[in-house]
Image (spheres, helix red, strand yellow):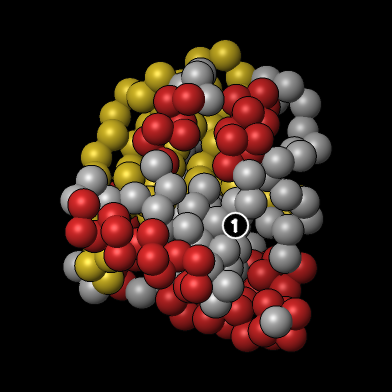
Amino acid sequence: MRLYQKYVLPRLLESAMGTSEIEILRRDVLKGVSGVVLEIGVGPGHNLPIYRNILKLYALEPSQELINIARTRAQGLSFPVEFLKESAENISLADGSIDTVVSTWTLCSIPDPRVALKEIARVIRPGGIFIFIDHGASPHALIRAMQKILTPITKYFTGNCHMDRDIEGLIREAGFRLRTVSHFYERSKPLMFNTQGTAMH
């Protein structure tokens, strides 16, 4: 499994999260990003060329293999990128130092999303914004049951993606106030229920 995680998974994520459908969603999610930005789980860096009008990006990612891929997309950008090889449960940034935190399909895979959300709340400045889109539990009983059955198996091959997490509930539980929120299924993956929105703490 370690060899899979090191050599196979980074390339799988590079392909699976780089589709045209996902690209359209990324552009919609990132259109309101500004200031000093922290991206949680930058992965292979698909978001990097999309950012506009930001001052600096802290790109947090625990996988060195994914950071290596992301660095190729960080070249020639109009803003500095600082990679942080660490987990979202322990962010090495000062309290209130970030204008916007971005999480795109990351809360579903973080080992402890509750701790990560507390850290996100800590580093956002007063009035700052948390922008997110994530896979999570469907409100439809049959699909949710299928998600619960499949997640213990598929998480080992998808970078720990939990299809059965209540993303909106976790964000609210962490004390965030939702400004906008929407829900939808991915056209090409009917089990992938997405929660997209913006929040303040």
Indicate left or right for 109 with 166 as reference: right
Disc 1 residue type (three-letter): Val
Neighbor class of circle 1 (other Cα within 10 Å; few <14, some 14-19, many 20+) is many
State the residue at coordinates (69%, 56%).
61
Q: Is residue 147 above or below residue 7?
A: above
Residue under numbered circle 1: 42
Q: Is residue 129 above or below residue 138?
A: above
Residue 31, picture quadrant: top left
Indicate left or right for 57 with 152 as reference: right
Residue 6 visible from this viewpoint: yes
Please tell me which residue lies in front, 58 or 184: 184
Tell me the element at label 1: loop
Q: Extreme top residue here?
A: 126
Where does the image place residue 13, in percent across and percent down from the top left? 52, 74
Q: Is residue 33 above or below residue 186?
A: above
Where does the image place residue 84, in percent across and percent down from the top left? 76, 51
Indicate left or right for 119 with 13 as reference: right
Where does the image place residue 169, in percent across and percent down from the top left? 40, 32
Please tell me which residue lies in front, 93 or 110: 110
Where does the image place residue 179, in percent across and percent down from the top left? 33, 23
For the N terminus, which image quadrant? bottom right
State the residue at coordinates (44%, 37%).
131
State the residue at coordinates (29%, 55%).
144
Residue 38 visible from this viewpoint: no
Please tell me which residue lies in front, 38 or 191: 191
State the residue at coordinates (46%, 34%).
170
